[in-house]
Image (cartoon, rainbow, N blue to C red):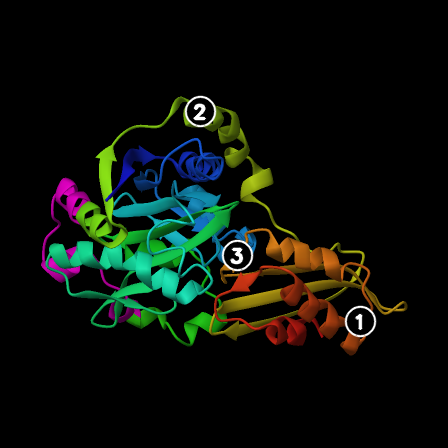
Amino acid sequence: MSDWRLLDTGILSGAENMALDDVILECRAEHQTPNTLRFLQFKPSTVLVGYHQSVEQEVRVSFCKDNDVEVNRRVTGGGTILFTPTCLGWEIFADKTTQGVNELRKDLGKLAAFISNGAVLGLKKLGVDAEFRPKNDIEVNGRKISGTGGTERGDSFMYQGTLLIDFDVDLMLRSLRIPVEKLKDKEIDSVKERVTCLKWELGYVPPLDEIKTAFREGFEEILGADLKSSGLFPVEESMFKKRLPYFKSDEWVQMVRRPENTAGQVSAMKKTPGGLIRVSLALDVPGKFIISSFITGDFQVFPQRAIMDLEARLKDASTDTDVITKIVHDFFNETSTRVFGIEPDDFVGLIL
């Protein structure tokens, strides 16, 4: 078994938790800290948009401001979630050569299943018959109890999940804007039939320490890890203090990239097996070229900055079908970009 750090950062704000995600991943990538399992909680309740999402499109901002619900942005992709104090987050920070990971890292689906099985084992230890559901959920009898996702930096990665201990359906529906495409699959009246939580499954809420112990043991079994409790390293504490103001700022939270109003604008969206994609283009109509492109959605992409790199390639490109097709396909062929459940032609179709 290999030595890992068990890091429990307790209850923090959304900005503090997101800053720590960035810091812990950075320090792991620079080989300054060991592989880590982190437990985290949020107070006040926090809406977290995925890295590539627009706050205005995903969040009922006015409601959140009026009801003490913080809004922030994850360093990982995926969809928008509500993190209440009755949720427990778990996160894996590790080197890509970690046991079981190195062989799977090129297959995101298998990697997600492998790591998520640590949480599945934890739930089973609590008496909940959970299982992994592709592409990145954990379910109980077809009802979602945990969502997962990740990102990478250098030769390290982060993979995280949420556990619904109790579930405030009303707060979620009032805090989040659910796209029309999703309403077809998740009718508001049937939310409770699609989602579950520990309290609903067991009829009571186990002590938090009992939940954490079960998850700790589950991840130890899956990862072949010996988890030893420890706090933040001095380098992490120093970096956290420096980066926290940025993660509280609009520059981070409102990282909304929209076409300028002066440009000709077109937009399109599509629901794919990998998630919802929105593409907005600012066009020079007479010149038939793209001034700027803005790609958002609840998909998961590795590496994190890949979408911005694709947008950069599309800048000033001709709107000719063959040109766009070549740019997109060349981008995916020439880079290590990987996207859950989405093909290059999905992007091509939306751009055209």
Tell which tag, 3 or 1, sits nearer the viewer: 3
Which amino acid, mark 2? Answer: Val
Q: Separation of disc 3 and disc 1 at Cα?
A: 26 Å
The residue pinned by badge 2 equals 235
Horizontal side of 163 relative to 351 (left or right) equals left
Label 1 Cα crowd, 10 Å radius (few <14 / some 14-19 / many 20+): some
The disc at residue 319 is 1
Please say whether residue 115 is visible from this viewpoint: yes
Which amino acid, mark 3? Answer: Phe
Q: Earlier in the sequence, mark 1 or mark 2?
A: 2
Q: Position of residue 280 (x, y in %)?
A: 67, 64
Q: Separation of disc 3 and disc 2 at Cα?
A: 26 Å
The residue pinned by badge 3 equals 302
Look at the image and say whether residue 182 sits in the magenta stretch. no
Which amino acid, mark 1? Answer: Thr
Type of secondary structure dominating the magenta stretch: helix
Label 3 Cα crowd, 10 Å radius (few <14 / some 14-19 / many 20+): many
Q: Residue at x 51, y 74 (%)?
A: 272
Q: Earlier in the sequence, mark 3 or mark 1?
A: 3
| Kind of element beneath mark 2 | helix
Q: How many marks?
A: 3
Label 2 Cα crowd, 10 Å radius (few <14 / some 14-19 / many 20+): few
Viewer-side residue, 174 vs 317: 317
Extent of the magenta region = 191-214
Look at the image and say whether residue 208 sits in the magenta stretch. yes
Q: Position of residue 40 (x, y in %)?
A: 31, 40
Q: Position of residue 276 (x, y in %)?
A: 51, 68
Residue contact at pointers 1 and 2, CB within 8 angstroms:
no
Tell which tag, 1 or 2, sits nearer the viewer: 2
